[in-house]
Amino acid sequence: MTIFEDFFKAHWQNILIAGTVIVIIVGVVVYAKEKIRKSNAKAAGELCAADTIEELEAVIKKFPDHKSSDYARAKLGRRYFETGSYDKASEIFNSLSKKSRYKDLRAQAALNLAVILEQTGKTEEAAQKYSLIGRSTDYPEEYRADANCQAARIYISMNKNSLAKACLELIKPEKLRGEEDNQHYQKAKFLEMLM
């Protein structure tokens, strides 16, 4: 007999037990991963399907840490905005602008805060908020360009053309998708004609 055969003959029970344990562990891991995947899919489905304020509040409470919960919070903020609950909307957007794990959502939440300021008659504060977003490197370029256009639009309406010009000069077509054909760049060029 060979060394392998001798070893197998002497330890066949231990080998069988070890093999069985490995199969059981692999089975448990596969089962757990599948259960987690289904649970995540269910949570994502519920978070995406919620539409009313009540549904959104309930589903966010049910899945507060799910990776899709920030998008549900943003939707809830929009629903509050649409119903004129600006304080609640501001609270949500303020939190998202600082804590969201998604850069685009942080930027959109910051822009939404500026929209609320403008909507509530705080026009100069809105322009300053837009301008701050437009100068921040924490946000993607498209959002910064949008913010600079919004700030410039308000400054032009207030006859503060030097502030408007400073915002518009920050919009660089080479940094935007579509470069000179980009909607924000085109809007900036139009706003420049109004000064």
Image (cartoon, grey):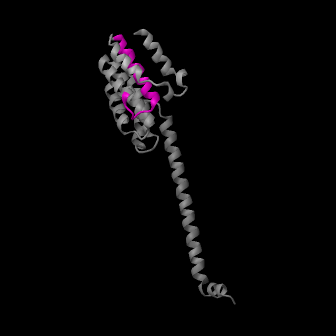
Give the main secondary structure of the magenta stretch. Answer: helix
Residue 69, position in %: x, y?
Answer: 44, 40
- Quadrant of the frame with the N terminus: bottom right
- Image height check: is 42 above or below 53? below
Q: Nearer the viewer, residue 106 or 44?
A: 106
Q: Which residues are magenta?
A: 135-157
Work out whether residue 85 can be spotted: no
Q: Nearer the viewer, residue 44 or 139?
A: 139
Q: Is residue 118 left or right of residue 35?
A: left
Residue 101, position in %: x, y?
Answer: 42, 41
Q: Is residue 131 left or right of residue 9?
A: left
Which residue is at 41% across, 39% downward?
60
Which residue is at 37% across, 29% downward?
110
Which residue is at 50% across, 36% downward?
48
Residue 7, position in %: x, y?
Answer: 62, 86
As for residue 137 lying within the magenta part, the answer is yes
